[in-house]
């Protein structure tokens, strides 16, 4: 209850009532944890851009087998990755400045969504290939 006050009366030595008001101040929740998470998550997003530089450089090798729609799609998706963390970084700091800490935390966490989806895709495709791919046994020729 910010701004709540309690009024009480004191009986002075002269027999008259003195009315006083004491505001009950509640300590606002600390914003430090969300600030630490904003900084840490965005440093990790910055580190992901270092790895993206390498991926962007070798993504043009998709055209080694010819200019195809799939090659263009792959290169455009890889090269557009920095838009994602930059947009969510700006949005999360705007939310933090407007004191919407929960929204800022969610938005800065969303910067990891493309990386998470990539890891899940690799894990599931590896799982599928390992367990559902038909194995051909090579026949040994004597």
Image (cartoon, grey):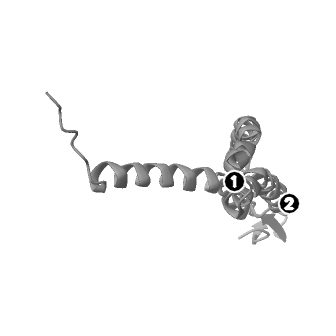
Mark number, residue 94: 2
Residue at image coords 17%, 31%: 141
Q: Quadrant of the N terminus?
A: bottom right
Distance (Cα) linking label 1 and label 2: 15 Å
- What SS does tag 1 mark? helix
Q: Which residue is mark 1?
A: 111
Please say if 52 is above or below 90. above
Residue 97 location (% of width, % of height):
86, 58
Q: Quadrant of the C terminus?
A: top left
Please say if 28 is above or below 18. above
Q: Choose top left, top right, bottom left or bottom right for residue 57.
A: top right
- What SS does tag 2 mark? helix
Viewer-nearest residue: 7 or 104: 104
Mark number, residue 123: none
Q: Earlier in the sequence, mark 1 or mark 2?
A: 2
Q: Residue furthest left?
A: 142
In the visual, does 89 lie left or right of 132? right
Residue 71 location (% of width, % of height):
70, 56
């Amino acid at each position: 209850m910010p701004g709540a006050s309690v009024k009480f009366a004191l009986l002075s030595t002269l027999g008259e009532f003195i009315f006083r008001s004491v505001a009950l101040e509640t300590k606002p929740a600390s914003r430090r944890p969300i600030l630490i998470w904003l900084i840490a998550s965005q440093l990790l997003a910055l580190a992901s851009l270092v790895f993206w530089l390498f991926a962007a450089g070798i993504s043009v090798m998709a055209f080694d087998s010819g200019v195809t729609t799939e090659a263009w799609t792959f290169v455009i998706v890889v090269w557009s990755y920095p838009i994602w963390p930059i947009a969510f970084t700006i949005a999360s700091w705007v939310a933090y400045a407007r004191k919407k800490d929960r929204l800022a935390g969610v938005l800065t966490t969303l910067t990891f969504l493309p990386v998470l989806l990539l890891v899940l895709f690799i894990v599931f495709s590896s799982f599928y290939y390992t367990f559902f791919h038909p194995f051909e046994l090579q026949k040994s020729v004597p």
